[in-house]
Image (cartoon, rainbow, N blue to C red):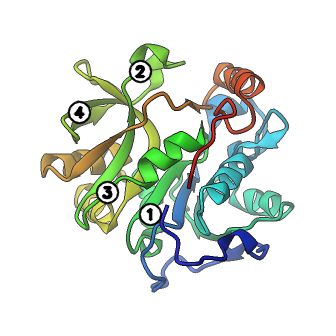
Amino acid sequence: MPDSDDGHKRWMLFRPRVVAWGRRMTTPAIRNRAVVLAAGLGSRLADGDLTPKPLREVAGVPLIVRIIRALEKGGIREIGIVIGYLGEDLQRGLSNYEHRARLSFFRNDEYEKPNGTSLLKARDFVTGPTLLLMSDHLWSPRLLKSVASYPVADRESVLGVDYSIDACFDLDDATKVQVRGDRIEQIGKELTDYNALDTGLFLITPALIEALDRVNGPEGCSLSQGVAALAADGRMKAADIGAATWIDVDTPEAHAEAERLIAELGEDLDGGAQVDH
């Protein structure tokens, strides 16, 4: 993965900082940034527990801490986290950990709206190719590399897709994708004609922010709506993740499966495979 600092293995340890979400940011657009959406209610996994969903532990480590550590290992140096429901609790929880990446927080007080609304709160953070992730998805380094290294034009965005449909843990809940060549044609949970699944890991550009602006309304907007808008213009690419492992930890059953996968494949879900960054 491209990196402008040859000494990146000697990063300083940063504590989280809060950035006013309306402020224009001018950091150079290189692929060492990521946005994590962590504003939602997470009610299906919570089961009455008032711990913010991203702080729910999987094999002894909070979900979002696993994600941050995996991003850091992949060369990501700046992470914007969109918070909403129990957002202050989430910030406090993260402050108990040391992070090599610099964390910024963007508040979404409209967290009951679809997830595209959350991404719009971090719009000023997306100045160029930027990874976009969900706070309840775990994935292996191979998946991250497949998406982060994908060639993308200024007016395009990329979604990591999984063609191994039969291997999906919860197919009913998965977002389906119809891909032709290297381009996404359709996306949605209710698709009946599809050949791939949405892994929840994107490489986006400001083009997706603009697409979300176009479809946004009083009820908010979803990422799938923004992806569909770009796809209609032929500007939404699909990155094949191959045999990389991933799981959406959205239910108690998926939580148990994630712990089983970690026990079987290791902390990075890669079974000991080596990945060059």
Residue annotated with mark 3 = 151
Apparent side of residue 258 relative to residue 219 in the rendered image (left or right) = right
Picture residue at 36% right of the left edge, 25% below the top: 163
Q: CA distance from mark 4 to mark 3?
A: 17 Å
The crowding category of the residue bearing disc 4, from other C-alpha atoms within 10 Å (few below 14, some 14 to 19, many at least 20), is many
**Residue 179: mark in rendering:** 4
Tell me the amino acid under the disc marked 2: Ser
- In the rendered view, tell whether residue 232 sits above or below residue 198: below
Q: Tell us which disc is closer to us: 3 or 2.
A: 3
Q: CA distance from mark 1 to mark 3?
A: 12 Å
**Residue 213: mark in rendering:** none
Q: Tell us which disc is closer to us: 1 or 3.
A: 3
Q: In terms of secondary structure, where does tag 3 sit?
A: loop
Q: Are marks 1 and 3 in contact (CB under 8 Å)?
A: no
Tell me the amino acid under the disc marked 3: Pro
Which quarter shows the C terminus?
bottom right
Q: In terms of secondary structure, where does tag 4 sit?
A: strand
Quarter residue 228 falls in: top left
Where does the image place residue 1, in percent across and percent down from the top left?
Answer: 49, 61
Specify whether residue 112 is in view: no
Query: Is 155 in front, or is 188?
Result: 155
Picture residue at 52% right of the left edge, 47% below the top: 144
Quarter residue 119 falls in: bottom left
- In the rendered view, tell whether residue 54 sits above or below residue 49: below
- In the rendered view, tell whether residue 219 sits above or below residue 209: above
Residue annotated with mark 1 = 130
Q: Are marks 1 and 2 in contact (CB under 8 Å)?
A: no
Apparent side of residue 60 relative to residue 173 in the rendered image (left or right) = right
Specify whether residue 269 is in view: yes
Tell me the amino acid under the disc marked 1: Thr
Residue annotated with mark 2 = 164
